[in-house]
Image (spheres, grey):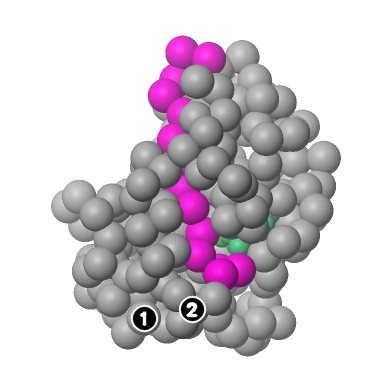
Amino acid sequence: MNKAQHITVSISVLSTDFVQLGANLQRIHMSGADSVHLDIMDGRFVPNISFGWSIAADIVKASRIPCGAHLMIERPEDAFDAMLATGVNEVLFHVEATRFPFRALDLLKRPGIRRGVAVNPATPVASVIPLLESLDTVLLMSVEPGFGGQPFLPGTLTKVRELRSAADRAGLSIRIAVDGGVDMSNATALRDAGATELSAGSAFFRATDPSAFVRALRGE
Ligand code: DX5
Ligand code: ZN
């Protein structure tokens, strides 16, 4: 159980109409969400392409809340400088996308920047245990990355518990984020399992009351 930890809510604009980006950002601001989750895809690591640095920089500039990048790209190290130049304050790369995660985390060590790894549903939690001391955040994917609007994979709950216990045993208070198919039906179970950040896209933009949605995800 992890109820003492502050739960944050991050909103992904991936599944929205990009022509309406300004209005969608406004909806995020009004909702009281903690941050914007930027899904960067290269069409290689995942079978989809989203947007790149220039649009990311525009979103960061227009955002009144912090923005974090979820890099779903091959060779993420090559993109760190361009990503950081957009003004994001967190960069997460996929542990499956690099052979040298320690080196990548080292490259991301910059003042004021949170760093971490994202983990595909089929990748065991054990693969990130050696990295825990070198990162701030582990993002557990609860769908196969690449698309918004997919159903939540319930096996994620076991992975959150496993990761939280491993971090507790190591005395580390890492952030555990969960991304994909997050909504009001699974948020309580995720918080109880030890998740500290919930990322949501389509459920947030479907919600009739966005601020009630954000509060519900936080358990308020
Ligand atoms: C999937 C992305 C997620 C996704 C979240 O590849 O990483 O951030 O857009 O959107 P929903 O909540 O629709 O699954
Ligand atoms: Zn994401």
Identify the residue position indicated by label 1 in the image.
55
* Residue 112: % across, % down: 20, 50
Q: What element does badge 2 sit on?
A: helix
Predominant SS of the magenta segment: loop
Identify the residue position indicated by label 2 in the image.
18
* Residue 189: % across, % down: 71, 26
Ligand 2 occupies quarter: bottom right
Residue sitting farthest toward the front: 208
The answer to whether one can see residue 187 in this image is yes
Q: Residue at x 24, y 54 (%)?
A: 64
Residue type, mark 2 in image: Phe
* Residue 5: % across, % down: 44, 20
Q: Which residue is drawn at 81% across and 47% down?
A: 153
Residue type, mark 1 in image: Ile
Q: Is residue 133 left or right of 109 when viewed as pictured?
A: right
Q: Is residue 32 left or right of 95 when viewed as pictured?
A: left
Query: Which residue range is magenta in the image?
Result: 3-16
User: Does the magenta run of residues contain 7?
Assistant: yes
Given residues 180 and 63, the one toward you in this image is 63
Q: Which of marks 2 and 1 is nearer the N terminus?
A: 2
Q: Distance between the residues labelled 2 and 1?
A: 10 Å
Q: What element does badge 1 sit on?
A: helix
Q: Is residue 186 left or right of 89 when viewed as pictured?
A: right
Q: Is label 2 in contact with label 1 (beta carbons under 8 Å)?
A: yes
Tell me: residue 118, above or below residue 207: below
Given residues 81 and 1, the one toward you in this image is 1
Tell me: residue 107, above or below residue 173: below
Instruction: Give the quarter of the image for residue 149.
Output: bottom right
Q: Residue at x 36, y 58 (%)?
A: 26
